[in-house]
Image: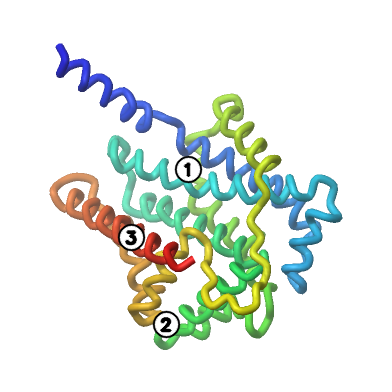
Amino acid sequence: MLARLRRTLLEAPLRWLLDHRWGGGSLISLFLSVLSGIVVALQYDYTSPFYSTSAIELVVPYGSFWRGLHYYSSQAFFLLLLAHLAAVLWKNDTTFSRSAWIRLCATLPCGLLLLFTGYVLRGDATGEAAGAIAEHICLSIPLIGPQINSLFFDIAASGMRKVYAHHVIGLVVLGGMAAWPHLRRYTARWRNHLVLALLTVLVAAAVPVPMEPYRFGLLFIAGPWFFLGLQELLFFLSPFLAGVVIPLLPLILLFWLPTQGRTRSFGLLAIGIWLLAYCLFTWLCMLRI
């Protein structure tokens, strides 16, 4: 009886985690991010990113709230997208063709780049450091590095123009194309995610959005939270290995992941080990802050 009760108590949270509408919550957060992003984008000037970002909170009515709503809903979108992927991988009860699976998994790098370019567009110390590191990593790619940097960043030569275009148009279109067949089958209703929406609104109204001004004499500037592990790896490895090869490993494993068998277990184990190692390097980087 005691063993059965213990098993029931352990299974109930796991069942809730697996059955929760993570994907719907991610989509609702994306809606909030897009709606608030429109308000922010109307006031943003990519020629003076730091000044215009700061001015949004001073000039736009409730500017601090709109900027906070865009920031926190974007964070929630990506985190809930990861939770949705984890639940899908754990249950493994839906069969996708390889092309459909790769297309769906492509929403992850699109979402991550959307989040990353949002940090860069702030134009503060954190955003400038992240943009400089991203350019350096792109240029380290053999043969096609300069072309990739010119396509996606090119901050040193053209400022934030290309980053802004990708943030508001390019990545949104690519992510939408990757997820569209899936979104046609599964819809998200606001009434199922009212708690999430209200919580995001309350956090946006109560918690100021981070803004890192320049501080002279500061020797170490940390990038976005999801960038810290990569930033720490750059101390030990070349930019190409730390910034391209290692971050691409879990994505390639995810694209290749079989649906059944021991090879799937090995693939999931490899992704898990990568995540643990990346968390370790993230923690090491946080010790420097």
Which residue is labeled 3 in the image?
A: 280
The span from disc 3 to disc 1 (Cα, nearest Å) is: 22 Å
What residue occupies the far bottom of the structure in this picture? 143
**Residue in view at x 67 percent, y 45 percent:** 69
Q: Which mark is residue 141?
A: 2
Judged by depth in the image, the label closer to the viewer, 1 or 2, is: 1
Judged by depth in the image, the label closer to the viewer, 3 or 1, is: 3
Marked residue nearer the N-terminal end (3 or 1): 1
Element under disc 2: loop
Q: Dot 1: few (<14), some (14–19), or many (≥20) neighbours within 10 Å?
A: many
Q: Position of residue 230 (x, y in %)?
A: 41, 68
Whether residue 48 appears in this view of the structure is yes
Along the line of sight, the residue nearer the viewer: 246 or 277 = 277
Q: Position of residue 160 (x, y in %)?
A: 68, 73
Q: Which amino acid is tagged 1?
A: Leu
Q: Position of residue 107 (x, y in %)?
A: 47, 53
